[in-house]
Image (cartoon, rainbow, N blue to C red):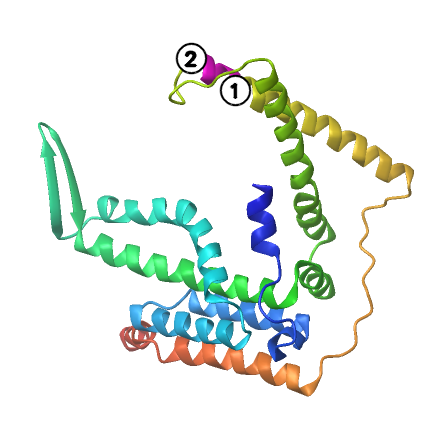
């Protein structure tokens, strides 16, 4: 898990590209607006254009495609399962049917269409967030969020999660080493009784140790004068080129939104 977080948050590409130098506040605002507007697109064509635009920004930032593909692989277990379920839970015209006695599994055309739209929306949001983090860095993104008056507790939760997930991962590796030193041999499958019981105990002990470590860290922070407040860093105003790039990204999102066939159909039906 720690390796996955490190791979996802590590800045990629060429730091000297002009998109890396755009003001972080402008990028946070523009990318957030782009994701919000593209999530409301109703047609596949509009979502495909949004994906193409984000890929063009990724290429302009000189982010390697192989590096981007490696990050996309982490998305499949989380979004892929949900997307694959849509054809079987959405009512509509059947396109595939499997029966076994009284059990019948049916996939519908409407379900496949909804799954495709959902997958394009997830891909759009992922590419946008990936572009933001890869060209800005987590620290600058958090500073921009602080500038926009995002609650301090939210920012601190992100910082502590990223910082201490490595500590928890190291603790888990130590526990695995100690377990192997005591002669533990896992079964051939997860549902092996001894393996299942041992892994359950490991998860429980890891939770208790993480809780105790969190308590110690919190009391140590209080002893050092922690009050829960975030000290906002004074940032210079964004330049004209920064604002122009932010406006360009938002204008593209607005153009996709208002010229989307689904939006036009909705407006005509509303009238």
Magenta segment, which residues? 193-199
Element assignment for label 1: helix
Name which of mark 2 and mark 1 comes first in the sequence: 2
- Residue drawn at point x = 53 percent, y = 15 percent: 184
Q: Is residue 196 above or below residue 156?
A: above
Q: Nearer the viewer, residue 16 or 147?
A: 16
Q: Residues within 10 Å of mark 1 (few under 14, many from 20)?
A: few
Residue 21 appears at what percent x and percent y?
67, 76
Based on the displayed image, in which of its 4 quarters is residue 213 positioned?
top right
Q: Is residue 247 left or right of residue 223?
A: left
Return the mark for residue 193: 2
Q: Distance between the Cα atoms at labels 2 and 1?
A: 11 Å
Residue 144 appears at what percent x and percent y?
70, 65
- Residue drawn at point x = 61 percent, y = 17 percent: 181
Q: Nearer the viewer, residue 263 or 176?
A: 176
Q: Which residue is mark 1?
A: 200
**Magenta stretch: includes residue 197:** yes
Residue 161 appears at what percent x and percent y?
66, 44
Q: Nearer the viewer, residue 220 or 110?
A: 220
Label 1 near label 2: C-beta < 8 Å?
no
Identify the image quadrant of the C terminus. bottom left
**Magenta stretch: includes residue 33:** no
Residue 135 appears at what percent x and percent y?
61, 68
Q: Is residue 123 above or below residue 218?
A: below
Q: Nearer the viewer, residue 74 or 120?
A: 74
Element assignment for label 2: helix
Overall secondary structure of the magenta section: helix
Q: Is residue 15 left or right of residue 35?
A: right
Based on the displayed image, in which of its 4 quarters is residue 226 positioned?
top right
Q: Is residue 28 left or right of residue 143?
A: left
Q: Is residue 246 above or below residue 105?
A: below
- Residue drawn at point x = 41 percent, y = 58 percent: 122
């Amino acid at each position: 898990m720690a390796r996955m977080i490190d791979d996802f948050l590590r800045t990629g590409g060429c730091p000297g590209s002009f998109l890396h130098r755009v003001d972080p506040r402008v990028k946070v605002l523009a990318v957030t607006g782009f994701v919000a507007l593209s999530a409301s697109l109703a047609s596949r064509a509009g979502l495909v254009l949004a994906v193409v635009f984000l890929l063009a920004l990724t290429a302009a930032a000189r982010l390697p495609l192989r590096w981007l593909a490696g990050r996309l692989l982490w998305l499949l277990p989380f979004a892929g399962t949900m997307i694959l379920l849509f054809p079987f839970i959405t009512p509509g015209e059947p396109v595939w049917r499997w029966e076994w006695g009284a059990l019948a599994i049916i996939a519908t055309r409407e379900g496949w269409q909804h799954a495709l739209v959902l997958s394009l929306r997830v891909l759009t949001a992922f590419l946008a967030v990936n572009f933001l983090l890869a060209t800005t860095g987590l620290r600058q993104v958090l500073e921009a969020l602080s500038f926009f008056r995002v609650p301090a507790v939210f920012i601190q939760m992100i910082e502590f999660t990223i910082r201490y997930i490595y500590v928890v991962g190291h603790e888990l590796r130590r526990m695995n080493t100690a377990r192997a030193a005591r002669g533990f041999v896992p079964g051939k499958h997860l549902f092996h009784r001894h393996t299942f019981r041992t892994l359950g105990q490991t998860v429980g002990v890891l939770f208790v140790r993480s809780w105790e470590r969190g308590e110690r860290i919190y009391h140590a922070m209080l002893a050092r004068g922690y009050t829960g407040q975030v000290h906002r860093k004074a940032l210079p105003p964004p330049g004209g080129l920064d604002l122009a790039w932010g406006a360009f990204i938002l204008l593209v999102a607005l153009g996709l939104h208002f010229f989307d066939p689904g939006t036009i159909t909705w407006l005509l039906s509303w009238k």
